[in-house]
Image (tube, rainbow, N blue to C red):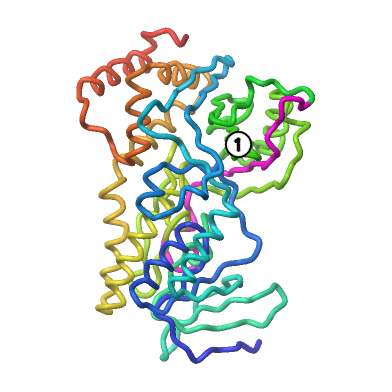
Amino acid sequence: MSIATEDAIYDAVVVGGGPSGATIAKDLADGGRRVLLLDRAGRIKPCGGAVPPRLLKDFEVPHSLLVARARSARMIAPSDRKVDMPVGEIGYVGMVDRDVFDEWLRNRAAEAGAERRTGTFERIERDEAGTSVCYKESRDGEMQQIRTRLVIGADGARSKVAAQNIAGAERMKCVFAYHEIIKSPANDTPGYDKDAFDGSRCDVFYQGHLSPDFYAWVFPHGETASVGVGSANKGFSLRGAVARMRGDLGLDSCETIRREGAPIPLKPLKRWDNGADVIVAGDAAGVVAPASGEGIYYAMMGGRCVARAAEQFLATGQPATLRQARRSFMREHGKVFWILGMMQHFWYSSDKRRERFVTMCADRDVQQLTWEAYMNKRLVRAKPIAHVRIFLKDCAHLLGLKAAA
């Protein structure tokens, strides 16, 4: 097979143009680096689209990209008991549409100087001249080869870059997510239960028949809504669960705009680089929060950590500097990920425990600290007495000393 090889050498080729890849490309281009952003056509990740206000500030994202602002969350237990968690005065949950949001990030990277190209990554080749990325612009197209000093894989949970270059990446544990973007119901929608959808509320269903080990959701997107479900159980019908949920909520008559599915990792890889010329980021690195499945903010923050480590590598030529990316991210967010992982392992394991989990969500201390942690993206230490109260209540639920409802 003939391979078309370019003479130009890039400082970095970023494979994948989601929030993480686009953030990396922009940050490196801002620093004067020659960057190629390679993204395959037609990719929209299934995602509820929730972002905290901190993301808009930290990454200078305009509020105009928000399609909705959720002011509360509703937790629905297996018994169908509903617990509302109002955000209060401390903020809101911003909602974005990934097709628009991701493209805006890619365009911004290009405006900063990154070169955009559409193509599908195939493999990395190395010879005496250095490192090359091989890709195709179409399935039957000619193989293209571009030389680079560093390859950054931001190509999702089933990352080819990671699988080919990072030890252990092929064993990444994932939740499989599926959602349908529908037109938001109007008051005259046939069969629509007006209490079942609120354009300012995120609904989360902790019910085994909708997900045996994760949760289902209905998230408002302004004129549209995301109705989805996640599960690591390969034998569980995600499409069937969404269809059942839409029918139960009277949303089955709403127009379906698009359907999307993809794996979502829930544990960071133990290593993000190969010690030479490759580093991964975003879903490819596993930076999605356990229990909640929140990924956009962590993808962008993890991407920023990777960009900083990449800049050090390009400046010094020392591969050891690439390890700083994971260390920096885990130093800031590792404890939160560990706690959320424990929550998911225990509370999502049965409907009996899900029922108790939703009951805990009715507690005002739990609500306040949950929202403060979400808005600030770190553990809240300012209220030790509230933490003690939550710990004691949590123990009571774990030991069955407190009624579930």
| Residue density around tag 1, few if under 14, some if 14–19, many if 20 or more, within 10 Å | many
165, above or below 176, in the image: below
Q: Which residues, given as a range, are shown in magenta?
A: 163-189
Q: Mark 1 highlights which residue?
A: 229
| Residue plotted at (58% across, 30% down) | 212
- Identify the secondary structure beneath mark 1: strand
| Residue plotted at (54% across, 71% down) | 38
Residue 175: say if magenta.
yes
373, above or below 170, in the image: above
- Please name the amino acid that badge 1 sits on: Val
Residue 166: say if magenta.
yes
Residue 118 rendering spot, x and y as whole percentages? 60, 72
The image quarter in which residue 333 lies: top left
The image quarter in which residue 384 lies: top left
80, above or below 50, in the image: above
| Residue plotted at (72% across, 45% down) | 257
Considering depth in this image, is 184 or 323 the residue closer to the camera?
184
Considering depth in this image, is 66 or 338 the residue closer to the camera?
66
Considering depth in this image, is 43 or 215 the residue closer to the camera?
43
Residue 321 rendering spot, x and y as whole percentages? 26, 69
Report the side of 379 relative to 34 (left or right).
Answer: left
Report the side of 245 relative to 12 (left or right).
Answer: right
Image quadrant holding the N terminus, namely: bottom right
Residue 54 rendering spot, x and y as whole percentages? 37, 45
